[in-house]
């Protein structure tokens, strides 16, 4: 650099600086595409971790579908969800309303505190039940009472039995059952509706 040229070497006006600036712009242009590819690969992971079959006592179920739950503007992976049915279907209404055994498995991609889980359940029921929320409040209180902090790769499993309700299984230990077919339908609706 000459005494009259005060620009730093490699700055935006030099050939090297222009090249770097073009590379930076190209990376920015490709960033949304990369995020989309990352989400797709996350969905692929959800399919890979969900076994094709699940068993409840005396009933064999098949994987109906699975997906990745993401949260926030950064699309943080929260959990992989898998739905198992006796008779798989592509119709969400049939999956929700059908009188058959069902299992929902949530496998967590990040650790969450008990209060984060409770807040999520509260928000999900409020969004899906609307004005009928009081009808499901008792079961929701039970569910929230059973929630404990959960770590990455741990599972919550929900076994839905026709005529009975939803059994909550936390890391292999049954916490109890929330009775009622209406409550069970609403619970499945959280994931399909």
Image (spheres, rainbow, N blue to C red):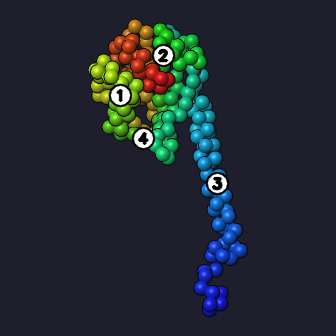
Judge depth for marks 2 and 4 and give the one in front: 2
Residue 131 appears at what percent x and percent y? Answer: 33, 22
Compute the Cα span from label 3 to label 2.
41 Å
Would residue 28 appear left or right of 127 to someone viewing this image?
A: right
Contact between labelled residues 3 and 4, with CB atoms less than 8 Å apart: no
Compute the Cα span from label 4 to label 3.
32 Å
Task: Name the residue tied to disc 3.
Answer: 29
Compute the Cα span from label 3 to label 1.
38 Å
Contact between labelled residues 4 and 2, with CB atoms less than 8 Å apart: no
Label 3 or label 1, whichever comes before in sequence order: 3
Mark identifier at residue 111: 4
Task: Name the residue tied to disc 2.
Answer: 96
The structure residue drawn at horizontal position 52% and vertical position 13%, both measured from the top left corner, is 94
Q: Can residue 139 be seen in the rendering of this structure?
A: no
Would residue 27 appear left or right of 85 to someone viewing this image?
A: right
Q: Please tell me how many numbered marks the rendered image carries.
A: 4
Residue 88 appears at what percent x and percent y? Answer: 58, 15
Q: Is residue 115 above or below residue 94?
A: below
* Label 3: how many Cα within 10 Å (few below 14, some 14–19, many 20+): few
Judge depth for marks 3 and 2 and give the one in front: 3
Q: Quick one: 18 or 140, which is closer to the camera?
A: 18
Q: Can residue 12 be seen in the rendering of this structure?
A: yes
């Amino acid at each position: 650099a000459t005494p009259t040229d005060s620009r730093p070497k490699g700055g935006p006006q030099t050939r090297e600086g222009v090249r770097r600036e073009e590379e930076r712009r190209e990376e920015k242009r490709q960033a949304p595409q990369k995020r989309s590819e990352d989400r797709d690969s996350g969905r692929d992971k959800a399919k890979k971790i969900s076994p094709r079959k699940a068993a409840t006592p005396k009933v064999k179920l098949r994987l109906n579908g699975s997906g990745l739950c993401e949260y926030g503007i950064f699309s943080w992976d929260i959990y992989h969800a898998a739905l198992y049915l006796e008779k798989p279907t592509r119709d969400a209404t049939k999956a929700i309303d059908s009188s058959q055994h069902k299992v929902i498995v949530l496998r967590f991609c990040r650790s969450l505190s008990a209060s984060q889980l409770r807040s999520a359940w509260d928000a999900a029921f409020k969004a899906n039940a609307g004005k009928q929320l009081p009808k499901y409040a008792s079961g929701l209180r039970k569910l929230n009472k059973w929630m404990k902090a959960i770590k990455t790769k741990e599972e919550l499993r929900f076994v839905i039995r026709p005529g009975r309700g939803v059994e909550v299984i936390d890391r292999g230990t049954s916490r109890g059952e929330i009775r009622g077919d209406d409550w069970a339908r609403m619970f499945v609706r959280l994931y399909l509706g």
